[in-house]
Amino acid sequence: MKVIEVVVPVPLNQTFYYLPLQNTDPQSIAGKRIKVKFKNRPMTAYALAVRETAENDFELKPIESIIDNENVITKESLELAKYISGNYVCSLGEALASIIPVSMKIPKRKPKDVFAGDENSYDIRHNLNAAQQNAADMINKSISGGENGKFLMFGITASGKTEVYLTCIEHALNLGKSAIMLISEISLTPQFVDIVTKRFGCKIGVWHSAVSDTEKYKLYMKAKNGEIKIMLGARSAVFAPFENLGLIIIDEEHEHTYKQEQKPSYDAREIAFWRGNYHKASVVLGSATPSLESYKDALENKLALIELPERIDKKRLPEVKVLSLKNKIYGRSLLLPETIDAISKALAKKEQVIVFLNRRGYSPSIMCRKCGSVFQCPSCSISMVYHRNPDLLKCHYCGESKKLPAVCCVCQSKEISVFGTGTQKVEDELKKMFSGAKIFRLDGDTASSKEVYSNAYKGIKNEEYDILLGTQMIAKGFDFPRVSLVCVIDADTSLYLPDFKSAEKTFQIITQVAGRCGRGDMRGNVIVQTGHPEHYAIECAKKHDFTAFYKAETEYRKKLFYPPYCDIAKIVVKNKDDKKAEEDSERLFILLEGFIKSCELHIKLLGPAPAYISKLHNTYRKHIIIKGNKEDMLKAAPLISAYKQSAGTQISIEIMPSDLI
């Protein structure tokens, strides 16, 4: 009897068998997504192969329906799923679902093309300087030879990395190969689509979370069938099913957005290297502030280091002035007098200004002045953030919102105050101070659709706005020649978070946002307001000195045994009952300790301890941190999966998490 071998996207690492549909060739089912009943629930599954089994050996359910008209599972996607399953502690079905989305829908009627591009687009080429030409030559040689080159392009802001990317994409296309370009932030999509389509004058695929399920199916099949040659997009675009892949570019490679937080918690950079090896394609990581891990790999010749040490046309890097907030009087302006003066002068000269604060909302804390109670989210152990227009308290983690209370819920006092600063509050102050200036605020509250990003990009580019205010969405990639001033309102929002990467993230964000100015004809200036002007992350950012920061930070990491000197994993134990979460985390910790000792594994355990945000979505969270080498961590993974936890407890493990919060 012929049966269909199937995997489902659930945390069970095994295959299942179903009967083929009646009057359907079983071979025509393999390689497609199908609908099945799994534990009496309808579910999308993946048909891997046709198997022979003894008749009536066991009772099997029939497949409900076939979703795809054409095969979507390739030999490569199945091998890649096995790699993801083995390296990120998930089932084969969960891994396949990250490569071939369950949600993709076949169009009921022929839709309009979902690709960017215009056949009438024009070709813009810029002459490469010596450093750019050297970079392009090295990468193109690797593409031509099918050498699976691995490169780190370390280029300061405005050094012309994008032009090198485009030159190498063109070379891959001329050889009949395809290219993937990953960008770190959806806000950058309009800019890069504009640049890439004008350069190549052809259709390209654009893949990110805002693309509809129907559009994704069209894109997926066009890429698989070779009808498009370039895929531009966010993290999951790394899975674009090109069959003759020549080049993968990961711009701003240091960004945490390339790491998937939900299961399977894959890293797009590692997937790119795997696919590069599979296709003998070249992989280019690019950044002005590389991750410590990538830079260390380059110094150890695991990646070929390409440096672009100067800005295009030898333009000078912006001058960075650090202003201390230590003596700032509470209740006064959010902006120091020197910052206000600098903005006034830039606006008077009809130049544009970027104002950066990595905290949205109006104020991050609401407190009763009488009893000191802080208004926390009832579902999460975190302060609710005050938002204006309308007046609401919002939790930025679970989305809960409630009206601003008139009295304290603890002591009934009316003495309620707001503390701290968010982008809404900065916007109000800027409007009062600079009433003639046109301001665009871009943050998680305003960016509800992809049109907002596009409007921000076009509006600043066309000089419709004088000030661009926002969070980290505006800190990277944007290229606006009329921006002469960047103001960082508070550089310390990430500096002292309880995470080993806090200094690195602070240095990166300041350096990146500083790099948005002085890209045109005028000299750029940056003002950084901070309560910790003496911190090495701030001092190195002021000097644009990545090498000095790398040296200081790696000394600290080496001493405390953190990446890049080890691998790390985060085990999260969750339960709505705090006591059960604590008991399970303690029992699991003891079990792991014994396993590590008996197997003589070279890994260390930290914890168990409450997470930084100890309650999230009404669920208590405990962390166990594992430090050592990845191979030994993966040996312990089956023990974690097999652990018999209390009712309601969920346990997950994330290899090389982007943070420990």
Image (cartoon, helix red, strand yellow):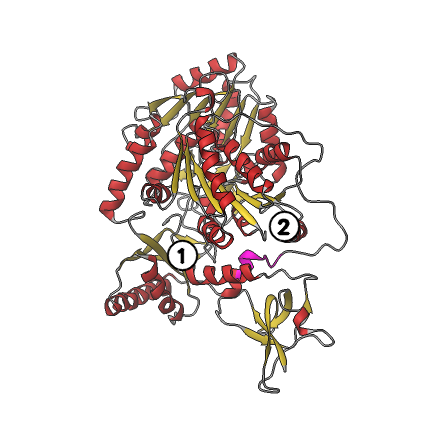
Is residue 335 part of the magenta span, yes or no?
no
| Rendered residue at 45%/34% (across/down) | 135
Taking the image as drawn, is residue 211 in sight? Answer: yes
| Rendered residue at 54%/34% (across/down) | 167
Q: Where's the N terminus, which quadrant? A: bottom right
Q: Could you tell me which secondary element the residue under label 2 belongs to?
A: helix
Q: Is residue 141 left or right of residue 588?
A: right
Q: Which residue is mark 1?
A: 654
The boundaries of the magenta stretch are 96-103
Q: Nearer the viewer, mark 2 or mark 1?
A: 2
Number of numbered discs overlaid on the protein picture = 2
Is residue 99 part of the magenta span, yes or no?
yes
Taking the image as drawn, is residue 394 in sight? Answer: no
Q: Residues within 10 Å of mark 1 (few under 14, many from 20)?
A: many
Q: Which mark is drawn over residue 223? A: 2
- Residue 15, x across and y down, in percent: 53, 72
Q: How much space separates mark 2 and mark 1, taking CA atoms? A: 30 Å
| Rendered residue at 63%/70% (across/down) | 36
Q: Nearer the viewer, residue 189 or 363?
A: 189
The quadrant in which residue 421 appears is top left
- Residue 277, x across and y down, in percent: 46, 53
